[in-house]
Amino acid sequence: MAIVKYKGEIVFENSNEIKENSKDKLREIDYNNLIMDFTEVSFIDSSGIGFILSLFKFLREREGSLVIANANDKIKKNFEITKLSQIIEIIDSIDEAYNYLK
């Protein structure tokens, strides 16, 4: 299981680069379960949502799982509006996310 800490904004200008870097890292370390730590993510736009869905699909094809931890209230609201929270688990802490994926 990998834990990746994201920082700043995940928006159109950087979402593709972040997606490719994340996939490359997961291939390199050969993990199929990912906890995305959003403690330091301040904003996410629709491109960022697309990035998360792309990683979700990538991991699912590898029979893995993706969980988001520590998202702020604004980001959680975006996940609810876009219905992402119905597809991907949004969990309040790394420990809870780790236990969820065990």
Image (cartoon, rainbow, N blue to C red):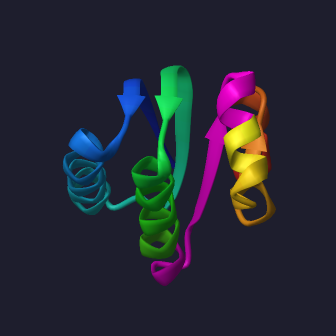
Q: Do we see residue 70 in this rendering?
A: no
For residue 76, side relative to residue 39 (left or right): right
Instruction: Choose between 98 and 22: the one closer to the eye.
Output: 22
Per the rendered image, the range of residues in magenta is 60-76
Question: Image quadrant of residue 24?
Answer: bottom left
For residue 87, above or below residue 10: below
Question: Image quadrant of residue 69?
Answer: top right
Could you tell me how many numbered marks the image carries?
0
- The residue that appears at 21% across and 49% down in the rendered structure is 21
For residue 62, above or below residue 3: below
Measuring from the top left, give residue 33's x and y in whole percent. Answer: 53, 57
For residue 25, above or below residue 23: above
Q: Do we see residue 5 in this rendering?
A: yes
- The residue that appears at 49% across and 37% down in the rendered structure is 44
Instruction: Choose between 91 and 34: the one closer to the eye.
Output: 91
- The residue that appears at 55% across and 28% down in the rendered structure is 38
For residue 32, side relative to residue 35 (left or right): left
Measuring from the top left, give residue 71's x and y in whole percent. Answer: 66, 28
Let me know if residue 69 is in the magenta part.
Answer: yes
Measuring from the top left, give residue 98's x and y in whole percent. Answer: 69, 40
